[in-house]
Amino acid sequence: MKLTEEQINRYSRHILLKEVGGKGQQKLMNGRVLIIGAGGLGSPIALYLAAAGVGTIGIADADQVDLSNLQRQVIHSTPDVGRAKVISAKEKMLAINPELNVVTYETWVNADNILSMVADYDFVIDGTDNFAAKFLINDACVLAGKPYSHGGILQFDGQTFTVAPGQSPCYRCIFPEPPPKDVIPTCSRAGVIGVLPGVIGTLQATEAIKFLLGTGDLLHGRLLTYNALRMRFREVPIKKSPKCPICGDNPTITEVKDEVDAMTVCDLGH
Amino acid sequence: MNLTVNGKSASIAEETPVSITYLLEALKVEQREYVTVELNGDIMDRGDFDGATVKDGDNVEFLYFMGGGR
């Protein structure tokens, strides 16, 4: 496949980079990335992956745009209030880059649908807002051997790292089990500064792009934390845990299941 | 004793080694029932919090759940 004149123009700033070049741009165009969550984290991820020319982008979310989302979910606009987030997101992505194949999943991920969804992609990005989904995504990606980027935000703090299943630590190596429901504050209860998901989501998109290019160092075994108030990034080295319940020496989790105890009313579709 | 806690210098009055449970109380760590504790690069089992000892010069990381994204 040869880049067209228009593609060479569109992606010229990528092609100039020796780490990308024409070959790298073609890798991006052949790349397939699944974004789970079309909200705060999902917005910059979807916009930047679309702009970068990632050829097939899946986006999953059952929610509709709410006025209170617009303070941070920059892919959605005021006229989108009440519309499905995945449809709103797809329109903006195609407006940036009409060449893309954007696949929408207007559903919450659950144990019944997640494995077939991740199977179609090279890389998965967690942009969800609850522990049930975060643990489910980890488990599905580890069991399917699918590399993925974890992201979490709250108030002024964010964290992200990237999992190479079986090779680098997974989410359960750090947090073996989800916390009981409602003991950890959520953004909807505790608030979040609007620019925060822009920072963390853009880092996650960067990881996906580097993964597809096969260049640079991914956040394997390194939990990157960010505090917007103190304007400080830190990197915490993380080891793969032999006692990890899913990727350790004697795993107790061998299939995906819904973490019902960690679900919130919102996850159950209410 | 002097410790490095999440990258910053911290000290507690005790000079002899203390348990992680004691340290969580002494430093008034938030979410102490759920926080993950890394001691000198190793993530500690919650079941070992009473036994594992923290000594002068140790590097401690508290890793918090962050469930937001939307």
Image: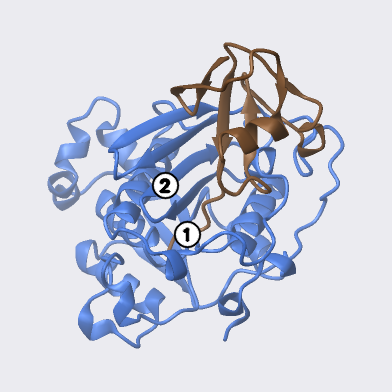
Chain colours: A blue, B brown
Residue B35 in sight from this viewpoint: yes
Element assignment for label 2: strand
Amino acid carrying mark 2 in the image: Gly
Say which residue appears at 36% left-offset and 62% top-offset: A40
Say which residue appears at 43% left-offset and 48% top-offset: A31
For disc 1, the chain is B
**Image check: A48 left or right of A236?**
left
Say which residue appears at 28% left-offset and 44% top-offset: A2
Q: Does A23 appear above or below A87? A: above
Residue A119 in sight from this viewpoint: no
Q: Are marks 1 and 2 on the same chain?
A: no
Residue position marked by numbered label 2 in the rendering: A158
Amino acid carrying mark 1 in the image: Gly
Between A61 and A19, the one lying in front of the other is A61
Q: Position of residue A86 (x, y in %)?
A: 40, 74
Residue position marked by numbered label 1 in the rendering: B68
Between A30 and B45, the one lying in front of the other is B45
Query: Which of the 4 image quadrants contains residue A109?
Result: bottom right
Element assignment for label 1: loop
